[in-house]
Structures are given as structure tokens and as C-alpha cells.
Image (tube, helix red, strand yellow):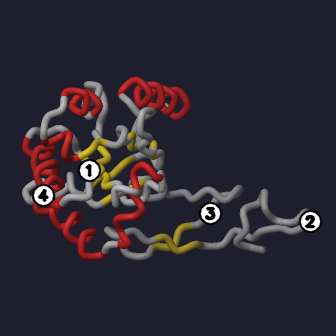
């Protein structure tokens, strides 16, 4: 009961002020005293709210990619809402699903879907693929042409239109193909590790 936040303790109980040990990666453990109300005298170290590989985000907000929904206009609206409510737009806003083959073949509609607003940072793109060769070429294209900062691979979509072609949530069941697709994406951007997360 002593360690509970004052608002969570049952009525009639009290908490004693006592030293608490605080440690950070840079500093050894140091006792600090709590002030009444539970606030520490020394500010807690700042850490990213969300870390995906080398990508560090100040906000834990992640907008999931949705085909036909998370286009540039929708992502802009969502970023504006985060900015309005938190003062910053620091989350990860993933664009709608992009097919690797159509991207490599430079389909005009696909290239439009893969575009980002000038103020979008980081730029996250979801890649749908079932072919290691197209995966490699698409990842390489995204990295070399600086089209995205983060590549999200679609391995979870349960929609029949996606799974009947062997993609989305059907792909991890095919372990060799799954390994080949992931390996191809990593090989596609060897000098850009932050993109292949």
C-alpha cells in the first residue's frame, strides 16, 4: 500500500515519504526523496515513447496502414489532431498498403499512393509482397530514391483478397518464403538500416 499512488490507495490509508532508488543508463543508482504528492525532486530521464530499431518517436501513436484509407489527406488530418491534442505530431503514420511489384514497375497510381506530404516525418510505407525478387527491388528503390524512412512489411492482413494470393497473414505460414521475403527486404537496403525495420 505504501508504494501505491495516493489516488489508488483505499480511503483511510496513508503513505510515508521514503527514499526511492532511481537509475539511468548513464548514471549509477542514486537515492532521491519524494516530495509530498509523489513527485520526484529530480526529473526522470527522457526516453522515446516508442522505439522501432533505430527509429525513435516521441509519441506512442501509430496509425495502422489501411488500404484505401490512410492516404496523404487522411494522415494529414490525423497528424493535425495529434498536434491539436498534444502539441506535437511525433507518431508514426503509415501510408496505405503498397504492392511491391506495382511500385517497382512504377505504376502511376501506386507512386501517387506512396507519396508523402512535405511535413511528414518519419515517412512510413507498408509493403505488400509475396515475391522475394520484387521485395528486394522495391526495398532498394525506396532506400535509394529516399521515398520512405521506414518500411512496414504486411504480414498480418487477414482479408481474403490478400491471403488467397499468399500474402498478408498467410505468408508467415510459409516459413521458407517468409524468410526469403524478409531477407530480400533487408538486402535491398543494406546501407540504410533505419529503413528496414
Left or right: residue 2 compared with residue 159: right
Mark 1 lies on a secondary structure that is strand
Q: Position of residue 11 (x, y in %)?
A: 90, 63
Mark before the other along the chain sequence, 4 or 3: 3
Q: Which residue is mark 1?
A: 151
Q: What separation in Å lies between label 4 and label 3 (alpha carbons)?
A: 58 Å
Q: Which residue is mark 4?
A: 133
Mark before the other along the chain sequence, 2 or 3: 2
Snapshot quadrant of residue 164: bottom left
- In front of the other: label 4 or label 3? 4
In terms of depth relative to the viewer, which is nearer, 10 or 55? 55
| Figure check: 146 above or below 5 | above
Q: Position of residue 57 (x, y in %)?
A: 37, 48
Q: What separation in Å lies between label 3 and label 1 (alpha carbons)?
A: 43 Å
Mark 3 lies on a secondary structure that is loop
Q: What separation in Å lies between label 2 and label 3 (alpha carbons)?
A: 21 Å
- In front of the other: label 1 or label 4? 4
In terms of depth relative to the viewer, which is nearer, 128 or 8? 128
Q: What separation in Å lies between label 2 and label 1 (alpha carbons)?
A: 53 Å
Left or right: residue 105 compared with residue 181: left
- In front of the other: label 2 or label 1? 1
Residue 88 visible, this angle: no
Q: Which residue is mark 3?
A: 34
Q: What separation in Å lies between label 1 and label 4 (alpha carbons)?
A: 16 Å
Mark before the other along the chain sequence, 1 or 4: 4
Marker disc for residue 12: 2
Mark before the other along the chain sequence, 2 or 4: 2
Mark 4 lies on a secondary structure that is helix
Q: Residues within 10 Å of mark 1 (few under 14, many from 20)?
A: many
Amino acid at each position: 500500500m505504501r508504494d501505491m499512488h495516493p489516488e489508488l490507495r483505499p480511503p483511510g490509508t496513508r503513505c510515508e515519504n521514503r527514499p526511492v532508488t532511481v537509475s539511468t543508463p548513464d548514471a549509477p543508482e542514486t537515492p532521491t526523496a519524494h516530495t509530498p504528492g509523489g513527485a520526484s525532486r529530480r526529473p526522470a530521464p527522457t526516453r522515446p515513447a516508442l522505439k522501432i530499431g533505430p527509429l525513435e518517436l516521441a509519441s506512442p501513436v501509430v496509425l495502422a496502414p489501411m488500404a484505401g484509407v490512410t492516404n496523404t489527406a487522411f494522415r494529414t488530418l490525423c497528424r493535425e489532431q495529434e498536434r491539436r491534442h498534444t502539441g506535437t505530431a511525433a507518431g508514426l503514420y503509415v501510408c496505405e498498403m503498397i504492392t511491391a511489384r506495382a511500385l517497382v514497375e512504377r505504376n502511376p497510381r501506386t507512386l501517387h499512393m506512396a507519396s508523402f506530404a512535405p511535413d511528414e516525418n518519419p515517412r512510413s510505407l507498408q509493403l505488400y509482397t509475396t515475391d522475394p525478387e520484387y521485395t528486394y527491388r522495391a526495398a532498394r528503390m525506396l532506400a535509394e530514391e529516399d521515398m520512405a524512412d521506414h518500411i512496414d512489411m504486411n504480414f498480418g492482413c487477414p482479408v481474403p483478397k490478400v491471403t488467397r494470393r499468399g500474402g498478408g497473414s498467410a505468408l508467415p505460414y510459409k516459413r521458407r518464403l517468409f524468410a526469403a521475403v524478409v531477407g530480400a527486404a533487408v538486402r535491398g537496403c543494406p546501407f540504410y538500416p533505419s529503413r528496414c525495420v
